[in-house]
Image (spheres, helix red, strand yellow):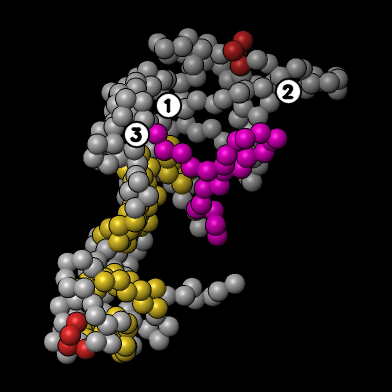
Amino acid sequence: MPPILSFSAPSGGGPPPATPDLDAVLVAGNVALTRDVLIAATHALDAAVAATVLQIGTTNASAVRFGTATGTTSTFQAFFNQSASFLSNAGLQFSSTTANRGSCRMNQFGNNAGVPGITGFKSRGTNVGDLVSCSAGDVLWRATAIGVPADNASVPLAGWLGINVPTGGVGANYLATDFEVRLTPLAGPINGHRQAFLVDSEAILHGRETANSFAGVATIGAGGNVVVANTRVSATTKFLLTVQDTGPAPTGTIYQSARAVGASFTIASSAGAADAGVVVYYQLWEPVATPP
């Protein structure tokens, strides 16, 4: 067993010796770099005193590298406050019971154009550092929401925000992008997230049009009106109505005439039965709960 290196102040009480350069005293190494430090699975790098900050690369280092080098395949993972992967194969994982500690904050200082935030990068290259074109449908960035429901056992994916490459969106030197919002409805089911909104690469808004959604189409009936079932109708809901070209032109004024909170709303025409068959597109809007 090699001797353990230790350094202490001279017995005469003089100043301690200069901190030795690790490169000058290490003999252990691996086949990649002759002065690498090999640490067994049972060893740990830790501070000598509890609650002391362990400083790595804080004086002269311009970077600290973990895992394999650029230009190679890599399966490296880093865990903080946890001993192994937790319900995910994500490469960087952090766990905490301290309030707000389970968040990521990026700070930018300096009189420059630097931007704080989270950046995603996608390449289909085999090795780290290889640049190979993305494909239509690739996700370039995603923020995913996951939580524990009432059964305290399931861990469903609840929703996400994503930047995606649309069909036809791979150019010679650019990628077109869509912005997608997926949400899980009140009725579920587990992993029932579905596309709620999508802003396409031309900035056109796509909204979900199903029962209880914010938008849809309805046709004026023989009585000059139509009742649209929607349990999301509230006392403060606002209605936007526009006549569509898939039916006859109206002879009267199309308006929202009544509502049943938690059940439905009614679209009517001032011309009554004369406007039967008129097709109306509607949108529901709600004011924010706590306006400024």
Q: Is residue 45 above or below residue 24?
A: below
Report the residue marked by disc 1: 67
The magenta segment: 98-121
Rendered residue at 34%/38% (across/down): 176
Residue 130 lies in quadrant: top left
- Going by the image, does 192 lie left or right of 235? left
Q: Is residue 280 magenta?
A: no
- Residue 147: give x, y in percent of width and height: 36, 61
1 or 3: mark nearer the eye: 3
Q: Residues within 10 Å of mark 1 (few under 14, many from 20)?
A: few
Label 3 to label 2, Cα distance in Å? Answer: 60 Å
Rendered residue at 40%/10% (across/down): 31
Give the label on residue 8, or none: 2
Observer-nearest residue: 191 or 165? 165
- Going by the image, does 222 lie left or right of 260? left
Report the residue marked by disc 3: 175
Amino acid type at circle 2 is: Ser
